[in-house]
């Protein structure tokens, strides 16, 4: 059974940093595409960043230069390091995975989703 466990959310002041983790189980962590998404209250879910097993990455314009996505294949974990956080980054953050993605980056659909982790950025 494939499972994704997202963690690392919390309350932080504007300008601060957090690191989110997405730990996967149930599939071989050598061929995948993983994405981070977020959904703020009253807003639609949006893509934040994604990475594949070839270490290709992509970022939404709103987080470029502030967020970094990375992976540790030995730990079956993808990280989202968030710096210079702004109140508008407040949202529930989700990770999603597509195993056996080949060279796909940011696929249109993901097979598996983790539970969300709440990030709250205060003024």
Image: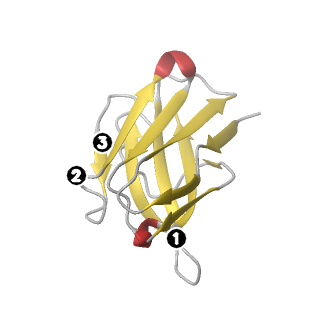
Pointers 2 and 3 in contact (CB under 8 A)? no
For this orientation, the residue located farthest to the bottom is 42
Q: Which residue is mark 2?
A: 65
Taking the spot 43% from the left edge, 29% from the top edge, the residue there is: 71
| Residue 23 relative to residue 38: left or right | right
Q: CA distance from mark 2 to mark 1?
A: 21 Å
Q: Which circle's residue, 3 or 1, is located before the other in the chain?
A: 1
For this orientation, the residue located farthest to the right is 1
Residue 23, position as x, y percentages in the image = 61, 33
| Residue 110 relative to residue 85: left or right | right
Task: Tell me the tag on residue 57.
Answer: 3
Secondary structure at badge 3 equals strand
Taking the spot 59% from the left edge, 78% from the top edge, the residue there is: 41
Q: Quadrant of residue 76?
A: top right
Viewer-side residue, 52 vs 121: 121
User: Colour scheme used in the picture?
Assistant: secondary structure
Secondary structure at badge 2 equals loop
Residue 122, position as x, y percentages in the image = 49, 68
Q: Which residue is mark 1?
A: 45
What is the crowding at mark 1: few (fewer than 14 residues within 10 Å), some, or many (at least 20)?
Answer: some
Q: Which circle's residue, 2 or 3, is located before the other in the chain?
A: 3
The C terminus lies in quadrant: bottom left
Q: CA distance from mark 3 to mark 1?
A: 19 Å
Q: CA distance from mark 2 to mark 3?
A: 13 Å
| Residue 57 relative to residue 26: left or right | left
Secondary structure at badge 1 equals loop
Taking the spot 61% from the left edge, 48% from the top edge, the residue there is: 111
For this orientation, the residue located farthest to the left is 65
Establish if 34 lies above or below 53.
below
Viewer-side residue, 103 vs 49: 49
Residue 87, position as x, y percentages in the image = 43, 71
């Amino acid at each position: 059974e494939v499972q994704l466990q997202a963690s690392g959310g919390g309350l932080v002041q504007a300008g601060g940093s957090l690191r989110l983790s997405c730990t996967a189980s149930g599939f071989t962590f050598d061929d995948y595409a993983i994405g981070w998404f977020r959904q703020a209250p009253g807003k639609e879910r949006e893509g934040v960043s994604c990475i594949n097993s070839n270490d290709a990455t992509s970022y939404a314009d709103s987080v470029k230069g502030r967020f970094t996505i990375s992976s540790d294949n030995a730990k079956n974990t993808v990280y989202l390091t968030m710096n210079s956080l702004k109140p508008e980054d407040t949202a529930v953050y989700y990770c999603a995975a597509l195993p056996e993605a080949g060279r796909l980056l940011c696929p249109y659909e993901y097979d598996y989703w983790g539970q969300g982790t709440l990030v709250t950025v205060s003024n």
